[in-house]
Image (cartoon, rainbow, N blue to C red):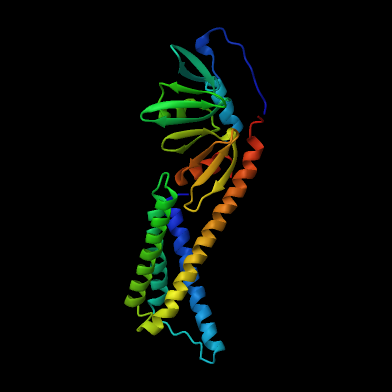
């Protein structure tokens, strides 16, 4: 894809325009990057705040109205609700149930259950459930 | 997969399986020296599709579960089997598919076979999805 970069003099003039025939996953990623959604999720750690990088997150779970962010080795609490995080996270994140968002890139494999749900095994060996209604979204995000 | 798509798939599968079952019954009858002729009033094809649709409805008992335990799933499965059997018996009675216990017996046997066939077909379709998703996941999976 041809990329044009033009220098401007003020921040008001800064912007990006993407001309594409189709919004592919790569373009979604580029949009996320330009909108600064790749950075991370601010999480509480002790009395301070730590930014949890989105490429390190395995899944995010809501339990008793609290939201927890899980990485390979840590679990952090964040003030954001799942619906807010859905807008902040890159394209390769999937709402997999009412109470969970998963990083698709951290899924090792899925297994179909009898009632049309799927059980996903993550790269760290943990297992999560992908509800029936979200399997369609997973397939869409994988381009199937 | 949406509920509507699952109900549609099951309606088609059950209707096709009923037709197949009738075909096998008549073939058996012919092989045993009978005439093997099917004479249908106008409403029979419609009654088969209607029965297929009504039989797909108890599937909702299995779909509305976020995280079912094994015991709960088996109880719901038993309820689904019995309610679907009830639908078949009622439709059979209303549409005159049987007039005595003797003529009900092949229908009961056919019901059990069709139930097993639909489960096997749904399982196969889900396994096909599972395979496609796992292949796509390998392409984007993080290396850890």
Instruction: Specify whether residue B57 is in view.
Output: no
Q: Tell me where residue A81 sits by quadrant.
A: top left
Q: Residue at x 44, y 63 (%)?
A: B11
Q: Residue furthest top?
A: A9
Q: Residue at x 38, y 55 (%)?
A: B61
The residue lying toward the viewer, choosing from A133 and B43, is A133
Residue A91 position (above or below residue B38): above
Residue B113 position (above or below residue B129): below
Q: Answer left or right for A14 relative to B10.
A: right
The residue lying toward the viewer, choosing from A20 and A65, is A65
Image quadrant occupied by the C terminus of chain B: top right
Instruction: Specify whether residue A88 is in view.
Output: yes
- Residue A13 x %, y %: 52, 13
- Residue B59 x %, y %: 41, 57
- Residue B19 x %, y %: 49, 74
- Residue B135 x %, y %: 65, 44
């Amino acid at each position: 894809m041809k990329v044009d970069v033009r220098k401007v003099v003020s921040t008001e003039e800064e912007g990006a325009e993407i001309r594409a025939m189709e919004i592919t996953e790569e373009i979604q990623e580029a949009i996320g990057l330009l909108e600064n959604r790749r950075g991370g999720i601010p999480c509480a750690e002790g009395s301070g705040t730590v930014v949890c990088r989105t490429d390190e997150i395995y899944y995010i779970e809501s339990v008793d109205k609290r939201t927890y962010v899980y990485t390979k080795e840590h679990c952090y609490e964040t003030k954001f609700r799942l619906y807010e995080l859905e807008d902040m996270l890159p394209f390769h994140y999937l709402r997999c149930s009412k109470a969970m968002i998963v990083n698709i890139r951290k899924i090792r494999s899925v297994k179909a259950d009898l009632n049309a749900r799927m059980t996903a095994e993550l790269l760290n060996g943990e297992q999560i459930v992908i509800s029936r209604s979200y399997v369609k979204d997973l397939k869409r995000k994988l381009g199937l | 997969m949406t509920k509507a798509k699952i109900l549609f798939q099951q309606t088609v599968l059950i209707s096709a399986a009923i037709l197949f079952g009738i075909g096998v019954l008549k073939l058996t009858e012919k092989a045993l020296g009978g005439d093997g002729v099917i004479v249908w009033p106008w409403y029979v094809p419609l009654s088969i599709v209607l029965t297929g649709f009504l039989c797909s409805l108890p599937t909702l008992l299995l779909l509305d579960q976020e995280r079912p335990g094994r015991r709960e799933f088996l109880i719901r499965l038993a309820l689904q089997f019995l309610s679907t059997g009830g639908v078949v018996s009622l439709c059979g009675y209303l549409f005159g598919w049987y007039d005595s216990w003797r003529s009900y017996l092949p229908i009961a046997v056919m019901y059990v076979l069709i139930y097993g066939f639909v489960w096997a077909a749904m399982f196969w379709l889900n396994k096909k999805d599972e395979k496609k998703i796992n292949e796509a996941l390998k392409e984007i999976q993080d290396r850890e």
